Amino acid sequence: MDCSALNLYELNSQKSGVLRLTLTDFRNYPHLRINAHLGPIIITGENGTGKTNILEAISFLTPGRGLRAAKLSDIRRITPALVPDEYMPTALGMVNWAVSATVQKGDDTIEIGTAVEKSLRESEDDTRSFDKRIVKINGQKTSSQAELGRHISAIWITPQMDRLFRGGSQPRRSFLDRLVYAFDLEHAKRTANFEHLYRQWYQLLKAGKSNEDWLLSLEENMAALGVAIAAARREQIAKLNTFIEHEPDDVFPNVILELEGIIEKKLDKLPAIDVEDFYRDLLKKQRRNILYNDSIDGVNRTDFKVFYRKKRMPAELCSTGEQKSLLISIILAQTKCQTLDKGFAPILLLDEVVAHLDEIKREALLEKINQLGLQAWITSTDPYLFSSLKDTAQFFEVKNNQLKEKSI
């Protein structure tokens, strides 16, 4: 057993994951409470019963917009729930949906709550209400979602990601940024701030308002944030490539990861401060592109490229089954790398993950989840695909907006 494998084995004893999950008015659930153990959790049921909604709720315990990237207002259950006081999680005020959890990280137990509440935004002309996500950790309200990353992280695979390598670059970029969050807690905040500044810059130019000082200030801030974002992405890619090279998987195909972006390539040759100057000047030159709806170069156009190492083939040219295997390979490498680096493993959220996997790869994935001691929430319509986990996994069935534990 090599050093890395030994370290992983030792860290397996430091379990991490969700011990208790409570949903209130979340999607189809008026109220749901799940007491979970720190191992594989198999959730089965017919299509449309709400299996994915449970995984989505867990994803909201981490920074970001969840595994569906849904609008906050779209998540609330349409029919209001009347939930007894004793079932309420940490008090979060007047909310329209809530998720709370007891989370274990090694020897520590943390209470996390997140919810959406109505807030008001005043302007010169009127006052408008908007949905605002709030977060509490151990009963204390926090102003930054990044704090969640100190206690819990999650990685997911959903059926929509079957097209990850063949569609546009935005989903791949978002996937990569989620991998970065686990190692760089400020990355989520930087990407959100960059998007906010970009929207201001875009709207200002579209409106034809030529406030030069304002534009220059936005471009200065965008350049600084953009270079920091590109640097964090480069560091994560290098970390994963090095890990995969030294710790190749024995079943799933090994990959080579690359970034295709003008700012990332500049960082290969120039110091960060010089790249900031370059980026600021680039944004200024591209102001006219906004007016003519032309593309804009920068970190919001960077592409995350994946290659099947053995075949020397880009992922988008591989078969559907190979693409799913490549994705799982990245997830496993990230999981092992994070466990060694941070001392605790991410939660795996695997929605219909066995689709397009043959029996050998399916059983290999389940065995690796067991060996790594991971908490993995796995959905499927068929519980018997997971018979090899019958002695180690929890099995639940979803029916009529309720979850019942069962055996197979």
Image (cartoon, grey):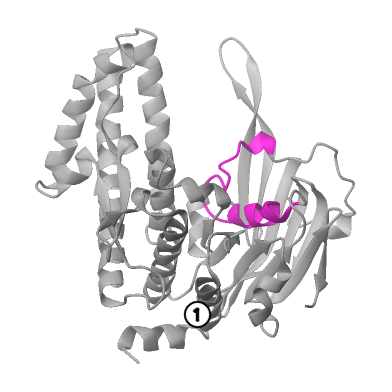
> Mark 1: which amino acid?
Leu
**SS at circle 1:** loop
What residue sits right under mark 1 in the picture? 372
Q: Is residue 312 above or below residue 274?
A: below
Quadrant hosting residue 278: top left
Query: Percent x, y for residue 237?
Result: 29, 58
In the drawing, does residue 221 fall left or right of residue 87?
left
Residue 105 seen in the figure: yes
Residue 143 seen in the figure: no
Query: How many neighbours does mark 1 have within 10 angstroms: few (below 14), some (14-19), or many (20 or more)?
Result: many
Q: Residue furthest bottom?
A: 1
Q: Residue at x 70, y 81 (%)?
A: 390
Q: Residue at x 47, y 46 (%)?
A: 163
In the drawing, does residue 321 fall left or right of residue 264?
right
Quadrant hosting residue 8: bottom left
Q: How many marks?
A: 1
Camera-side residue of 393 and 321: 321
Image quadrant where one finds the N terminus: bottom left
Q: Residue at x 68, y 78 (%)?
A: 387
Image quadrant where one finds the C terminus: bottom right
Query: Percent x, y for residue 11?
Result: 46, 83
Query: Percent x, y for residue 197?
Result: 38, 29
Query: Percent x, y for residue 277?
Result: 15, 34
Residue stretch rendered in magenta on the structure: 50-74
Q: Is residue 66 magenta?
A: yes
Camera-side residue of 238 and 64: 238
Q: Is residue 194 above or below residue 219?
A: below
Q: Residue at x 53, y 57 (%)?
A: 157
Q: Is residue 344 magenta?
A: no
Camera-side residue of 44 and 130: 44
